[in-house]
Amino acid sequence: LYPPGPSGQVAETPAEVFQALEQLGHQAFRPGQERVIMQILSGMSTLLVSPTGSGKSLCYQLPALLYARRSPCLTLVISPLLSLMDDQVSGLPPCLKVACIHSGMTRKQRESALKKVQAAQVHVLMLSPEALVGAGLGPSGCLPQLPPVAFACVDEAHCLSQWSHNFRPCYLRVCKVLREHLGVRCFLGLTATATHSTSRDVAQHLGVAEELVLSEPVTVPANLYLSVSMDRDPEQALVTLLQSDRFRALSSIIVYCNRREDTERVAALLRTCLRASRD
């Protein structure tokens, strides 16, 4: 929408951007948002590393709204978390029309969402990486039927990096599909979890220049204590930890796992081991 200057500098933020900001229910930009939004509106691929709750979603919502006003086009958002998709859709203002396609939907629901997209009734299409990669690339698939894509937002972008604790190989195929089959040239990567090496790796996959990577400082709340350990047998280490004096007296505790099947296995292990220790 706003071509960069002769030396690649981003244009000064125009009035319509601030008007769109108010239309989306905000009075002012948070740190980093304006820069990222203007880079995307200038067609510059960008990576934003910013804490949870810092307003990263606005960085794709506002450009999506403005791009759709200029011409019939679509913004793609790739997200691995189905629950986050549903939350974002339900929390969006009425002026931004969004559809989802993911594995948790029935075939009829997916077809209904695709029809809305094809009829230009949607500004943003949210897809799981598996839904995009498996959507079909031939004449009968849904990808060739999509409107022109203004830009693609890759949420949880750390999943692209093999340095990440949550690397997902399917994400690498997503970039290939977006580039080769949908002609996407502008990418926005969003994550709250990325070390320097992870950020560099993600930026390379998305084609983001070093100067277009924005990392906001991540602060740990004062009431949180972080401890990291590397164990040969993580499950046994977890059992030992929960049996220690520090945790034994707690009435409840949350254990996070990378995959759903891991949660079921770990839950069964804890029920067995912790019950045995109490008997």
Image (spheres, helix red, strand yellow):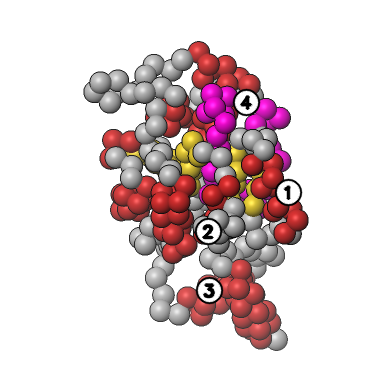
Residue farthest to the front, as pictured = 139
Residue 145 sits inside the magenta stretch:
no
For image coordinates 48% across by 42% down, the residue present is: 152
Residue carrying label 3: 238
Q: Earlier in the sequence, mark 2 or mark 4?
A: 4
Asked whether 136 or 32 is in front, the reply is 136
Q: Do the residues labelled 1 and 3 touch (CB within 8 Å)?
A: no
Mark 3 is surrounded, within 10 Å at the Cα level, by few (under 14), some (14 to 19) or many (20 or more) other residues, namely: some
Position of residue 67 relative to residue 270, above or below, is above
Return the residue at label 2. Answer: 138
Residue 134 visible in the current orientation:
yes
Which residue bears the numbered disc 4? Answer: 24
Q: Is residue 80 left or right of residue 46?
A: right
- Indicate the secondary structure of the residue bearing disc 1: helix
Mark 2 → mark 4, Cα distance in angstroms: 37 Å
Count of marks, rendered view: 4
Image coordinates for residue 100, horizontal then vertical, percent: 65, 48
Mark 1 or mark 2: which comes first in sequence? 1
